[in-house]
Amino acid sequence: MEKNQELYYDEIESLRRFKSKIDTHAIYKEDLDGFCDEYEELVAQAKVITRVSDRLQKKLDNANIQIREQNDEIKDKNVQLADTVDQLAKAKVGRRASTILFTVAVVLFILEQLLLEPIIEKYFETQYISLGILGLLFIIVKFSEGAMETFFMNREKRKILAQENKDQ
């Protein structure tokens, strides 16, 4: 700040002296020539400063554009990453839910065949009741799959959020 004050101090002092000569009507050709020379030098300095400033501003604008583009690219990559993580979690959860429900379905089928089938055969002469029970078990298992996937998905999301909070 001091250099700028010193630089402008000389020009301001020169202007003050020149105004003082104007007020006293004591202006000579040498005064006008000197003032013109100082003014030309000041304009030349202003041109150089303006050119440098323009170049720096252009570099800054280009850097800001590049930063914005990189930020947009990072945002896009983060969205893609989040989608991929979500898809992987859904696949993992879907496999886990399917495995559990398949096991439950097999156990229920075996239990139905071992426990209920003899009772149904003993008291009823039709196999439609047994098929109805198997159909009911199938429907229960199928609807349970969606609930189980939702449960596992929510658990997986809590794990991810906990890991993100831990990393931060």
Image (spheres, rainbow, N blue to C red):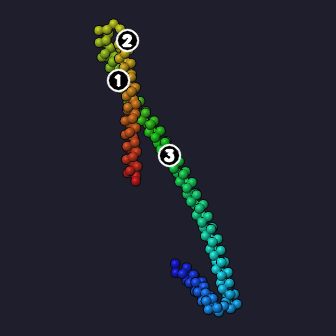
Residue visible at 51% across and 50% down?
A: 75
Q: Is residue 14 visible?
A: no
The amino acid marked with disc number 1 is Val
Q: Which one is closest to the eye, mark 1 or mark 3?
A: 3
Locate residue 68: give its quadrant. bottom right
Residue 79 - label: 3
Residue visible at 50% across and 48% down?
A: 78
**Is 28 left, or right, of 131 in this rendering?**
right
Residue 42 - label: none
* Disc 2: which residue: 128
Locate residue 6: give its quadrant. bottom right
Check contact, mark 1 vs mark 3: CB within 8 A.
Answer: no
Q: Which one is closest to the eye, mark 1 or mark 2?
A: 2
Measure how far apart labels 2 and 3 are at the Cα level. Answer: 52 Å
Nearer the N terminus, badge 2 or badge 3?
3
Check contact, mark 2 vs mark 3: CB within 8 A.
Answer: no
* Disc 1: which residue: 107
* Residue 21 against residue 114 in the figure, above or below: below
Label 1 Cα neighbours within 10 Å, binned few <14 / some 14-19 / many ≥20: few
Q: Position of residue 87 (x, y in %)?
A: 47, 38
Label 3 Cα neighbours within 10 Å, binned few <14 / some 14-19 / many ≥20: few
Nearer the N terminus, badge 1 or badge 3?
3
Q: Secondary structure at mark 3?
A: helix
* Residue 124 against residue 134 in the figure, above or below: above
Residue visible at 58% across and 64% down?
A: 60
Q: Position of residue 99 (x, y in %)?
A: 40, 30
Return the residue nearer the eye: 65 or 11: 11
The amino acid marked with disc number 3 is Val
The amino acid marked with disc number 2 is Tyr
Residue visible at 69% across and 87% down?
A: 33
Q: Is residue 140 visible?
A: yes
Return the residue nearer the eye: 20 or 6: 20
